[in-house]
Amino acid sequence: MSDLKISHLYKNFSGMDRPVVNNVNLNIKAGELVALLGPSGCGKTTILKMITGLFQPDSGDIILDNTSLLPIVTEKRDVVMVFQNYLLFPYMNVNENVGFALKMKGINKDKIDEKVKDMLELVKLPDIGGRKPKQLSGGQQQRVALARALISKPKLLLLDEPLSNLDAHLRDEMRELIITIQQKLKVTTIFVTHDQEEAVLLADKIALIFDGKLQSYAPPKEYYECPINERAARFFGGVNFLKSTINNLNIETEIGLIIYNQKNKNDLLDNHLLAIRPENIKISKDNIFQKNCFSGIITSIIFSGTNTRYKIKIKDTILECSVQSLGIKGISENDKVFIYLPEDKLWGMNE
């Protein structure tokens, strides 16, 4: 297992109005599975390509096991990358594709055949060695590309949008396979994605990147419970925001006064926005709540299978509330309802 340190990494391309990668710092522990998450064009794949040596940074360093990778040519970095479009050799069969790296190293054919067999079993494709890439499904091609990357036992595995070309069912299967293989081989792994759910389900830690800058680097749970700012919260979706000011040590918001007695009150009041997730808002046809209760009108009801989402207009503000399963009986659009905002589910952040 290998540690990776990315230090003050910076990359700019001519004609761009901002750096593609701007002073990014990351410490990735041996054996970790880390997601580089962010919208398209934020610099995620550029970071991977600098780690492999396909791009050279303008400044900064990339250190693997206490050794800088920058002076080392790509093929000697002991880093492999699985590209989004797999890049399998079309004229080679699966066995030849998977064993290619070992053949280039001059390893004995019998040994290559043995290792290829082991790798295809690892990715659960034991019987397709004689097929050409064009005879494989997208999911099979992805697995073959993964086997080819892992056969040389790299110190670092890089995956560029590993699930983006697969349908929902295959994504679930591939996600489970990546986790299983990564845990079995304990290879330090970085993958790029713009899919929040994918990052949360796969990664030990998530590096959130906007406009080439690292916003936050933390376990998935922290992004859900306390995102660093409004943009990060909106990127992860499903958050209500209320502009706020202090009023006699309580909080005045655009929907009314919120009584707040929690221990983190001072921290909360130092910020400009209150935030609460839809599933944490309580909703009722009757006014059954003691405090922090507000009345509003249902403007929208959407059933999505696992939950029902309500949009509620309070004064000039729309809040979204989520209720499990079929929702609340007897509530329809344009009905008046009451909502409750629990103190312990509110948090503050900067705009």
Image (cartoon, grey):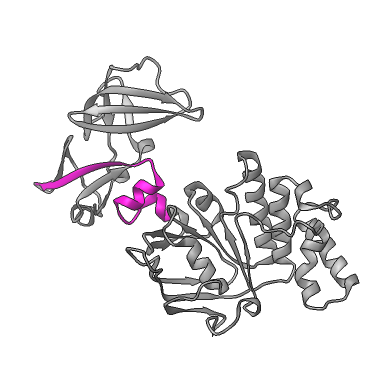
Task: Please tell me which residue is depicted at 33% across the width and 65% down the height of the picture.
Answer: 18
Task: Please tell me which residue is depicted at 76% across the width and 48% down the height of the picture.
Answer: 134
The magenta span reads: 222-247
Residue 278 screen position, x and y as percent: 36, 36
How many numbered marks, from 0 up? Answer: 0
Instruction: Determine whether 281 is above or below 190 in the image.
Output: above
Task: Please tell me which residue is depicted at 49% across the width and 48% down the height of the picture.
Answer: 195
Q: Nearer the viewer, residue 181 or 43?
A: 43
Q: Which of the 4 image quarters holds residue 244?
A: top left
Residue 29 appears in the figure: no
Q: Nearer the viewer, residue 72 or 152?
A: 72
Residue 227 screen position, x and y as percent: 35, 53
| Residue 225 magenta-highlighted | yes
| Residue 350 magenta-highlighted | no
Q: Nearer the viewer, residue 124 or 218?
A: 124
Instruction: Determine whether 307 is above or below 186 in the image.
Output: above
Instruction: Determine whether 78 is above or below 279 in the image.
Output: below
Q: Which of the 4 image quarters holds residue 328?
A: top left
Instruction: Determine whether 312 is above or below 51 in the image.
Output: above
Q: Residue furthest left?
A: 248
Task: Please tell me which residue is depicted at 65% across the width and 61% down the height of the picture.
Answer: 182
Q: Quadrant of the N terminus?
A: bottom right
